[in-house]
Every structure is written in C-alpha cells, then in structure tokens.
Amino acid sequence: MKTHKIIFFVSIIIVLTCSSFVSFKSNDLSKKFVVVLDAGHGGHDPGNMGNGYKEKDIALNVVLEVGRLLEKNADIKVIYTRKKDKFIDLFVRGKIANEANADLFVSVHCNAHHSSAHGTETFVLGTHRNNTNFEVAKRENSVIFMEDDYKSNYAGFDPNSPESVMSILLSQEEYLDQSIMLASLIQKAFTNNLKRKDRGVKQAGFIVLHQTVMPSVLVETGFLSYKKEGAYLNSSKGQKQISEAIYNAIIEYKKSLDKNVHEYPIVEEFSPETTSTSPSTEAATASNVIFKVQIAASSKFLENKSYNFNGLNSISNIKSGNLYKYFYGNTSSYEDVKRLEAEAKKRGYPSSFIVAFKDGKKIALDAALKSISN
C-alpha cells in the first residue's frame, strides 16, 4: 500500500512540474505587443479651446476608443497614460511607456491656428524643419510650465527657445524609421479612408516623444479652430472614425512587423562575418549621396536573396540596435530611387520609404536632397 501511495504522489509531482513548465513556456512565447496610448493634456490643462471645444476631452475619447478596439486583439496589451480627466506630467507619460517596455507610443492631440488651416498631420521626433513645426511643438511643450518642478524634470528646457528645441536631437534615431512608418500609415488611413486633408508626416521637437525609447508618434487629428473640422472632431461620429483610422494603422504596422519577422524563411543565423553591407559600400562613393529604399526591419537576419524579398534583387542590410534593416536598390539618382520605391510597394512592401547615406552614414533625406542640389 505504501508503494502505491509513493507512486501516486510522485506521479502528481511529475504532472504538476510538467504543467508548470508548459505554462511557463506558453507565457514566455506569448509576449504581447504593448501599445501605450497617450491622451494629450487633461485636468487643469484643457489644451486648445478652438470654437469652445476642449482638446483634452476629444483626445481622451479618441484614445479610449482606440484602446477598446485594440483590446479585442488577444496578442495586444494596451496601457493608457490617463483614462480620465487628469493632468499627467509629460516626463511621466514617457516613463509609463518606458517602464512597460512598450512596442509603440501614440500621443493624440488636436490642432489650432489663427488661420483657416485644417487637416491632419502626424509628427515624429526631430529638430523642427520650419517655423510652423516649431510653433506646434512650442504650444504642446508649453504644458511643462503647469508642472510643479519642470526645471529639474527637464534640465532647464525652454519651449519658447528655438535653440532649446533644436537641442532635442534624434535620441530616438534607432526608432525613427519605425516611427515614420507608423506615422505614414496613420496619415494614409486619414486620407484614403476618411478623405481628410493630408498635411503630411513631419518632424518636430516634442518633449513627450523625446522621453520615450520606442517607436513614437504624436497625432494632430485636426484643427478645432476650423469651425467645420472642430465640429467633426467634437462629434461622436468624428471621434469614432478617427479612432478606427488610428486603430487600423496600428494593426497594419504590427502586421508589417510580423510579416518581416515571421513570413520569410530564415536561411541562416546572423554572425558578424555574414553581414552583407558594410560602411565600405557607401564609402566607395566618396562623399556622394546614395539613395536606397528601406523595405523591412526584422529582429532576425535574412540572407539577401531575392526569394526572401518577394523577388526583389539588389538587397542590402545593416544592423541597428536589435533590428536588421533591409534596403532595396543603390543609386545616386533621386528620380531612380523613386521608381525603386514604387516597385517595392508594388511587390508587397506598402510601407517602404526612401533613405539616404553619405560617407557610409545614414543622413536625413532633406539634407541629402539639399546636398545633391548644391
């Protein structure tokens, strides 16, 4: 009888141990895609009040609806910087995203201007390209003056100083490509699906984006100061449509990443000796600018063979952080690279975009265009 009891208890222990191991492995393999949604302003900070509408309320309604839609996906986890009418310091918003090890940070706002300006625009972090971008960033960044200890929190940053904003360089450079990809998808959803006026993807020195260490965008959903657009954004219909557009863009972005990581056959594992593009590729062109089309970013190394990239040839890659970035083409002609970009999109890379290199280093596209025009 004792022998039977011992066998019984040993069996129970084995079953429990195995089930715990399976459970652990299951949890380990099912890491969710974490999206942090940030409703701009809140509490004693109403944001802009164009035509009497409150930016803080519209932003919150949109964020909550985007979150509700995302939460229907079992593989996505949503975190909110605020879920009610509450003031949250800008540096805290970034801290929430960083501590969550988020995959995306999306901040939602409404625009305003003294003119009849209207339409949507989505920003990624960067030095402002013109005075208009600076004014938008200055308005959003001025929120820090409402914080109790902004001087120590932001090391003397002055939102009213162009020099101070210019000091926010691309600390997010590792994530800039992905931020631009998401921003482009959001603008495309607004323009194609909702027929909104497209004001484009832009760069500006937003503190809330500067605080994060993941792909991050700031969405200006429209101008409350433009009567017709303000009424649309303040309506339940408008907020629902805006939310669905942002949601669809996030899902398309995630699918693009999943496709890049999982769909292609992994031919060999990465080793330093097998990196197929080195600085010497561009260095050979001396100081000339080289254009390429970025088509994918993957955490896995893929051999630069056409069968891995939907039949495209002339593939190269570089490693940036934990990602391998893949490029199609290599040309000094901007006209040629635009044709290559169109070909890449036709071959199944709708989120592809043009990048530039000079002396073996990646540079801003507008700087490259200025360089070749001089």
Image: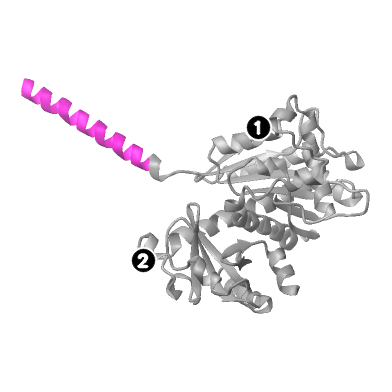
User: Can you say whether 214 is above or below 282 in the image?
Assistant: above
Q: Where does the magenta region start and end?
A: 1-26
Residue 234 or 224: which is nearer the viewer? 224
Front residue (pair 98, 369)? 369
Task: Look at the numbered disc 1 and give the secondary structure of its residue.
Answer: helix
The residue sitting at the right extreme is: 115
Disc number placed over residue 92 in the picture, else none: 1
Question: Crowding near pointer 2: few (<14 within 10 Å), some, many (20+)?
Answer: few
Image coordinates of residue 168 in percent, x first then y, are 70, 46
Q: In the image, what residue type sits under mark 1?
A: Val
Q: Is residue 113 left or right of residue 317?
A: right
Label annotation for residue 267: 2
Q: Tell me which secondary structure the magenta stretch mostly adopts.
A: helix
Q: CA distance from mark 1 to mark 2?
A: 43 Å
**Residue drawn 74% across and 29% down?**
151
Rendering quarter of residue 253 = bottom right
Q: Nearer the viewer, residue 203 or 15?
A: 203
Q: Is residue 285 above or below residue 94?
A: below
Q: At 77% across and 56% down in the image, what residue appears?
A: 129
Q: Would residue 16 be counted in the magenta stretch?
A: yes
- Horizontal and vertical percent for residue 147? 75, 28
Residue that lies at the very extreme toward the top in this rendered image: 2
